[in-house]
Image: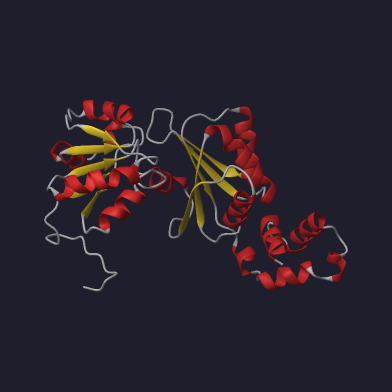
Amino acid sequence: MHPNLSLTGPDHTSSGQLFVVATPIGNLSDMTYRAVETLKSVAVIAAEDTRNSRKLLQHYGIQTPMITVHEHNEQAMLDKLLERLQNGENIALISDAGTPLISDPGYRLVSGLRQHAVRITPIPGASSILTALCAAGLPTDHFRYAGFLARSGKSRNEALSRLISSDETSVILESPRRLLATLKELQQLDSKREVVVARELTKLHEEFVSGPVDEVVSHFEQHEPRGEIVLLLAPASEEEIDLSDKQIVACLNSEAMLALPPSARAKAVAKTLDVTKSRVYALLNSE
């Protein structure tokens, strides 16, 4: 075997398996039969928060013991779980909701176990990302998942600039407390760009609010957002994408534009070329 090649398929190892099990994101009825049977059959369930998961287990009559594995202890738990797996026990990994590892803990654990040739078996199910995408009405042939954005600073500004300039649908996870602030930042970059706010997915008060950023901002200024939120951003227009970076830089460096302060310069170029200010700012900052 090549030294960097890892095989964890059937019959490759005699140790137990780690099952990565998706759980409902809201509606308990979205649990799959396979997920229920898996959680009943394993020796132990590694849960992000055993208190949150207890309700799910009780609902389905699952009496398997749980241990806590979260982002602060998963590296420390690796050796303990590995020992149990090597002794032939099967273990299930679940997060508080949805598919583990997708903006949830588990990466360090899965990566570490794969290095020891432990078989990792995914048990697919609910995902807020795909649930939002399939009903948002935005292009789904290509999409970019950004997870939770940095709360402030340069990395946040750069991320928003990349997303607003992308030719793919962008998917962001957001909290109700920060949603309006994020929408207003997008509004400054491109007030007419279509966005979709998917709220409380699969739950009683599920809601999709869509339209130009301007209109969605106005809606949430009048209606306080609640619950868990997925924010989707439409791709940049073909006209913006077709306009090359070189053309924008050339306009930025024209004699008339160089006479302006940086902020005014970027705004003037964006207006002249009919592109988003974020794209111009990104090129201006890279000079």
Query: Left or right: where does residue 195 sit relative to residue 189?
Result: left
Q: Is residue 99 visible?
A: no
**Residue occupying image coordinates x 65% and y 41%:** 184
**Residue occupying image coordinates x 16% and y 45%:** 90
Query: Left or right: where does residue 99 sit relative to residue 230?
Result: left
Q: How many marks?
A: 0
Corner quadrant of residue 280: bottom right
Query: Left or right: where does residue 250 sit relative to residue 139?
Result: right
Please say which color scheme the image uses. secondary structure
Q: Is 20 above or below relative to 249? A: above
Query: Left or right: where does residue 125 sit relative to residue 14?
Result: right
**Residue occupying image coordinates x 65% and y 49%:** 192
Corner quadrant of residue 27: top left
Q: Is 53 above or below relative to 130? A: above
Q: Position of residue 247 (x, y in %)?
A: 71, 72
Nearest to the observer: residue 44 or residue 96:
44
Nearest to the observer: residue 177 or residue 49:
49
Q: Position of residue 117 (x, y in %)?
A: 21, 59
**Residue occupying image coordinates x 71% and y 58%:** 281
Q: Position of residue 21 (x, y in %)?
A: 26, 44
Quadrant that contains the C terminus: bottom right
Q: Is residue 172 visible?
A: yes
Q: Position of residue 26 (x, y in %)?
A: 36, 33
Quadrant that contains the N terminus: bottom left
